[in-house]
Every structure is written in structure tokens, then in C-alpha cells.
């Protein structure tokens, strides 16, 4: 090690998978020091994102499944679940290798599937404004605060007075933010009036639209059109750094602005919009420069075909490294994955063995982002236990 330049060692290490890096920590103190360094952790993460390496597709059906993105051939269920991951556990966010999980509005955890670290958030009860109110719909969000280099969970609860009121006319709201760095919850006090019209029963209950989309330090939800109140589609944005709400500017859709259902997504680190026209056609828009209205451009359109009779829901996941990036992986209707070549307008269904029939998909990059203040003691203990078991088995043979 002493004869090899440090930059050569580092340049080699950050290209390796996380599982290999965790094992290399045991080889020597210098290696352990390099791999545990916060700058190295960021370097490894940024390299994986830039090169689209060490990526996995997470499928949430009844259980959680992992699929290698390079092959997309076999879905592997999460084995040896941590006790906080049950059947029915929801994944409401993915960012820099961390998954945000929820069993209920008070049972929330962060999980790094590459290191198998899990951090259970402290229980934060919902404060009802008065005895006449009941809890309404709960929105979630998860992402990276770029200002403070922190990871934050957002829980937004809407209240209502009538149990049978599903129109979304709520009386008060509670928004709380959990900071991983501070290990605590804080309440957001300044809430805009447009949140009162955000929830729409059928829109948000379908396809888990209450889970916010993270882009550029901001979490986004759609507040769908409310013609009865004279309100059009809104993109509600919550800035994790400022912990404030704002509205994201939308593109000029054209003459058919009132004819589609709007969804939000993220692709290659950019904000995306999906305009669904009567389930037969979807326009996908991309914001090239975040926050700038003029940077919106229509990326592609896709029409229904023999293999897809209707577009109930569509979300872009990632662009292919091959063919100049002209192919994009799409989640369609929560039941199918397809590669779509938007230049040739060709579509190819992806067949994954062992996956669930219905699912929600997200991309997860392998990373060393710690959930326990940088200590990998638990992981190393498990690796050592596995090594000892293998040694014992060999001796018995």
C-alpha cells in the first residue's frame, strides 16, 4: 500500500461495488480509513450516478424485490429482512442509495439495501387541531437537503371534520420534517392556502401519487385540477433546504391544456411531467434547467398499442446507456416495464422472472451513505458472522 499513490488507490476503490468495499475495510486500517472517509463516500456515489453503474431496480409488490438494472432478468426478494420491513411495507422515496419506508404514519424508517443498515425514525404523533377533526390523507416525501447535506423525510397530514367527505375540502394541515442529521422532527408553520385543495380522492389513492418526487433538493406533488373551485393543475414543491412550499412553473402545454391528467416524475436528475390524454396518449416533458419555465421541452409522446391497450399510469425511470440514450425504461400501469425508443417509436416489453404481478418501481444506486453516524460496526459484525459460519461448515465436511 505504501508504494501505491493514494489517488491511484482511491480511483480504483470508488469504482467497486459497495459489498466489495465493505469487505476491503477489514484488510487494513489505511483501507478502512479511506473507505469510511465522507469525501470518498460522496466520490463513490457521484461516480456511480455519473456512469450509471451499481444501479438496482426496486419493485414494491406485496413484498420488496431487487433487480440488477444491467440485466433486468431476475427479481430477488429482500432476504433476511430487518424487523422493521414487513409484508406490505411501502417505499415512498429513494435517494442516493437510501430507501424511505413506511408501515404507518408513525412507523417510518430509512434503509440502505447495499449496506443493510436501517434507521427507524422516532415516533412522531399526529396532533389533531381539535376533537371534531379526524385524520385525512397523508402525503410523504424523502430527499437530500443540498444546503446542509442532510437527508429529510416530509410527512404532510390533512384533517377533515366529516368522515364521509372525500372531496378534499380540508380544514387544517400539519407538515412535519425529520432531519437525519439532527435525529429530530420539526413542524412547518407557514403553509400556503393552495394546500387546502391539494387532495383528490381517486387521483391520490391510485398509483401512490401521495409519494413526492425528489429533484434538485426539492420534493414535488401534483395538486390536480379542481374546476369546481376554478383551480388548474398545480405542481406543489417543498424546498428541503428552506423548508418552505412554492409552486413550480409549468410548460405551455398548448390548446389542450384542460384535456389531460398530470403526473410528476424524475429522469436523469431532471424534473418530468406526464400529460395523460384520455388513457390513449402520454406526452412526457422535461425541465432541462430546474426552476426555469423556459427550459421545459417535450421529450416524447407515446400512443397506446397492441401490448398496451390503455395508459392508466406511466412513469419514466431511466435512460439506456446504449443507442445514444434514445431508449427510456417506463413503468406502465403498475404492471409492466417497457423499453421505449422515442426516436424510432418502438416499444419492447421487459420480462423479469420472479417479480410481482403488480408493483411500484424505483431506481436505487448502491452507496455507502451511513445511517449511524458513519459507523459500519453492525455490518462488519454480520459479515464476520457469515464468515465464521462458512468456516464451521467447511470443518464439519
Image: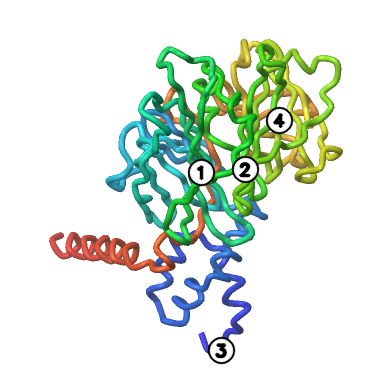
**Residue 150: percent from the left, percent from the top?**
54, 58
Q: Is residue 55 visible?
A: no
Residue at mark 4 to residue at mark 1: CA–CA distance:
22 Å
Circle 1 residue = 154
Q: Nearer the viewer, mark 4 or mark 3?
A: 4
Which of marks 1 and 2 precedes in the sequence? 1
Which of marks 3 and 4 precedes in the sequence? 3
Which of marks 3 and 2 precedes in the sequence? 3
Circle 4 residue = 273
Circle 2 residue = 238
Q: Nearer the viewer, mark 1 or mark 3?
A: 1
Say whether residue 130 is left or right of residue 68: left
Circle 3 residue = 3
Pointer 2 and pointer 1: residues touching (CB < 8 Å)?
yes
**Residue 9: percent from the left, percent from the top?**
57, 77
Question: Going by the picture, which residue comes out furthest to the bottom?
Answer: 2
Which of marks 1 and 4 precedes in the sequence? 1
Amino acid at each position: 500500500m505504501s508504494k501505491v499513490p493514494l489517488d491511484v488507490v482511491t480511483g480504483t476503490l470508488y469504482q467497486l461495488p459497495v459489498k466489495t468495499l465493505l469487505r476491503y475495510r477489514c484488510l487494513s486500517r489505511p483501507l478502512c480509513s479511506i473507505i469510511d472517509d465522507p469525501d470518498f463516500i460522496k466520490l463513490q456515489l457521484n461516480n456511480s450516478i455519473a456512469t450509471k453503474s451499481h444501479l438496482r431496480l426496486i419493485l414494491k409488490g406485496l413484498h420488496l424485490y431487487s433487480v440488477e438494472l444491467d440485466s433486468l432478468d431476475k427479481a430477488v426478494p429482500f432476504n433476511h429482512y430487518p424487523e422493521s420491513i414487513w409484508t406490505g411495507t411501502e417505499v415512498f422515496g429513494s435517494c442516493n442509495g437510501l430507501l424511505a419506508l413506511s408501515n404507518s404514519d408513525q412507523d417510518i424508517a430509512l434503509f440502505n439495501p447495499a449496506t443493510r443498515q436501517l434507521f427507524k425514525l422516532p415516533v412522531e404523533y399526529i396532533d389533531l387541531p381539535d376533537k371534531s377533526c379526524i385524520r385525512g390523507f397523508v402525503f410523504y416525501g424523502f430527499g437530500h437537503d443540498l444546503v446542509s447535506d442532510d437527508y429529510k423525510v416530509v410527512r404532510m397530514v390533512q384533517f377533515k371534520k366529516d368522515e364521509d367527505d372525500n372531496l378534499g375540502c380540508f380544514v387544517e394541515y400539519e407538515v412535519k420534517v425529520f432531519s437525519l442529521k439532527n435525529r429530530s422532527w420539526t413542524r412547518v408553520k407557514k403553509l400556503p392556502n393552495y394546500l387546502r385543495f391539494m387532495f383528490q380522492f381517486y387521483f391520490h389513492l391510485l398509483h401512490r401519487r401521495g409519494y413526492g418526487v425528489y429533484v434538485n433538493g426539492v420534493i414535488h406533488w401534483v395538486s390536480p385540477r379542481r374546476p369546481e373551485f376554478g383551480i388548474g393543475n398545480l405542481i406543489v414543491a417543498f424546498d428541503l433546504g428552506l423548508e418552505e412550499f412554492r409552486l413550480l412553473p409549468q410548460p405551455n402545454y398548448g390548446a389542450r391544456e384542460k384535456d389531460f391528467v398530470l403526473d410528476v416524475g424524475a429522469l436523469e436528475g431532471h424534473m418530468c411531467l406526464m400529460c395523460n390524454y384520455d388513457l390513449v396518449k402520454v406526452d412526457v416533458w422535461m425541465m432541462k434547467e430546474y426552476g426555469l419555465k423556459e427550459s421545459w421541452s417535450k421529450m416524447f409522446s407515446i400512443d397506446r398499442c397492441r401490448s398496451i391497450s390503455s395508459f392508466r399510469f406511466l412513469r419514466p425511470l431511466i435512460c439506456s446507456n446504449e443507442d445514444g440514450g434514445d431508449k427510456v425504461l417506463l413503468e406502465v400501469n403498475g404492471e409492466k416495464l417497457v423499453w421505449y425508443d422515442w426516436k424510432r417509436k418502438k416499444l419492447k416489453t421487459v420480462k423479469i422472472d420472479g417479480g410481482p404481478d403488480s408493483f411500484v418501481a424505483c431506481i436505487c444506486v448502491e452507496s455507502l451513505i451511513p445511517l449511524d453516524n458513519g459507523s459500519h460496526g453492525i455490518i462488519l459484525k454480520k459479515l464476520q458472522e457469515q464468515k465464521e459460519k462458512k468456516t464451521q461448515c467447511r470443518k464439519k465436511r
